[in-house]
Amino acid sequence: MTVKTANDIREMEKTCRLAAETLAYAKKHVKAGITTNELDKIVHDFILSHDAVPSPLNYHGYPKSICTSLNEVVCHGVPDNTVLREGDIINVDVTVYKHGFHGDTSATIFVGEVSERAKKITDAAFNAMHKGIDQVRPGGMTEDIGFAINKYATSKGFHVVKQIGGHGIGRAFHEEPFVPSFGKKGRGKPLKMWGTITVEPMINETSAEIIEMPIPGSTHHWYKTGDGTLSAQFEHTVLITDTGHQILTLLD
């Protein structure tokens, strides 16, 4: 985890605000009939119009500017010609690079009217993320975050993804430490004051093993639930302050 200077934090605040604005802009375009490729192009153009760069594009060969994870896709879904349909849920994951720093955020979005089960897992993912963020403080540990996330998710009858999680972030898109969505209190890696991490739990309906799928030309993979049930995710970039934390990708 890299410790940020006061100037670093000011620059990263601006980048993270742009990431939040980009996600808000993307949400306005999520509707039945649009393809994930069209959504990717809309967001790509928005980012470039703000003199920023979409961090995922060409990152280890990833071919698009955002990740679009639809229904049973857990994460890293690649935009293509899939058409969004009424009742779908889609996680749109946005990362922008500007001012020398990355800002990373995502949300699971409803496509029109969705089922009660879709609402329940989406609400659980949102609340689980905030339960994890509540544990971010100097002197805390990464597994404090994971413990809180897992406790909440299981209390609602859902299951956390253990293989993938949050990460340090700053001048590099992905830094140490790994930020899990499960764990034991007091264990893991220390949270350093003025460090920045992402908290991004992925919550599944069942405990079925997730399936890893290749992305052609990339060292990254996309993932889906093994039984085709739903997955939901939310993500914020969080600064560890002297008294607790500040969510950098939260709009006023």
Image (cartoon, rainbow, N blue to C red):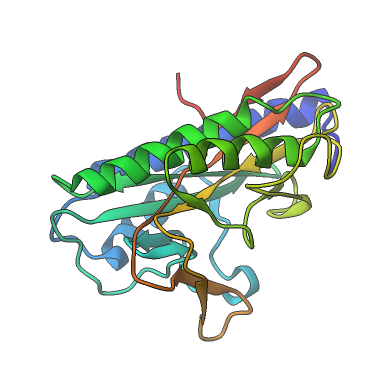
Residue 154, placed above or below residue 243: below
For residue 89, side relative to residue 67 (left or right): left
Residue 193, placed above or below residue 1: above
At 30% from the left and 43% from the top, the residue drawn is 27
For the C terminus, the image quarter is top left
Name which quarter of the figure residue 6 lies in. top right
Visible residue check, residue 14: no
Nearest the camera: 95 or 100? 95
Q: Give the x, y percent position of residue 86.
A: 13, 55
Query: Which residue is the extreme one toward the bottom?
Result: 216
Nearest the camera: 8 or 182? 182
Nearest the camera: 132 or 77? 132
At 36% from the left and 65% from the top, the residue drawn is 72
Q: Give the x, y percent position of residue 103.
A: 60, 42
Q: Give the x, y percent position of residue 201.
A: 55, 47
Query: Which residue is the extreme one toward the top?
Result: 243
Visible residue check, residue 102: yes
At 52% from the left and 46% from the top, the residue drawn is 51
Q: Give the x, y percent position of residue 133.
A: 62, 30
At 61% from the left and 33% from the top, the residue drawn is 132
Q: How many marks?
A: 0
For residue 173, side relative to residue 50 (left or right): right
